[in-house]
Image (spheres, grey):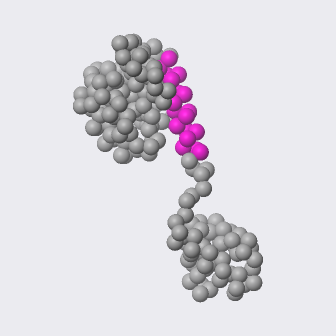
Amino acid sequence: MANIIIVLSKPEESAGIRNILIRGGYRSVFICANGAQAISQTDDLDDGIVICSYKLQDMMYSQLRENLPYGFEMLLLVSQKHENECAGDSQLSYLTLPLKTGTFMNKLGSMSDDLYRRRKRDRLKPKVRSEEDIKVINEAKQLLISRRNMTEDEAHKYIQKSSMESGSGLVETAKKVLTLLG
């Protein structure tokens, strides 16, 4: 389940939303009194959903949204008076007050699913290696090619296999190869 940060101007509203979330199965729920606390809370988490009102004690929702790190989504709870301002922004998720619990939980569930899919997609992306790391791997492959008469493909597979067997990274394994054969 997603991490949830609640930032509403009235503490009793935050407590009510928190109770709904806990009854709905969410365990990682944090209440913040203002936008600055919410931004600080995001530093301790990898991703999550920030539930906030249009106007916070120290900033507007738009300022909070600009300062949210990658991996955080916002669910804005807005009165009908401000709904028109939000409707034009296709990147903003919002619900109009008064809330209906079913609609609220469905929206939050959908946002949680999106976060889970993004987290999974990010994990599957290949890691970007630095120039130095690429150089180390290539040197190890060249050493295997010259000393063990391997093709480049065989050398790469050897480093990969050794890396998996030892539980260390590809670069670390390439450095071991350079130390042992160099």
- The front one of 1 and 129 is 129
**Residue at 52% in and 37% down:** 115
What predominant SS class does the magenta segment belong to? helix
x, y percentage for residue 95? 44, 19
Rendered view: 145 above or below 81: below
The reply to whether residue 12 is visible in this rendering is yes
x, y percentage for residue 148? 72, 84
**Residue at 58% in and 39% down:** 117
**Residue at 39% in and 20% down:** 85
Magenta highlight range: 103-121
State left or right for residue 12 relative to residue 22: left
Q: Is residue 59 magenta?
A: no
Q: Quadrant of residue 51?
A: top left
State left or right for residue 162 relative to residue 103: right
Q: Quadrant of residue 145?
A: bottom right
Q: Is residue 113 magenta?
A: yes
**Residue at 56% in and 33% down:** 113
Rendered view: 122 above or below 16: below
The reply to whether residue 168 is visible in this rendering is no
Rendered view: 13 above or below 154: above
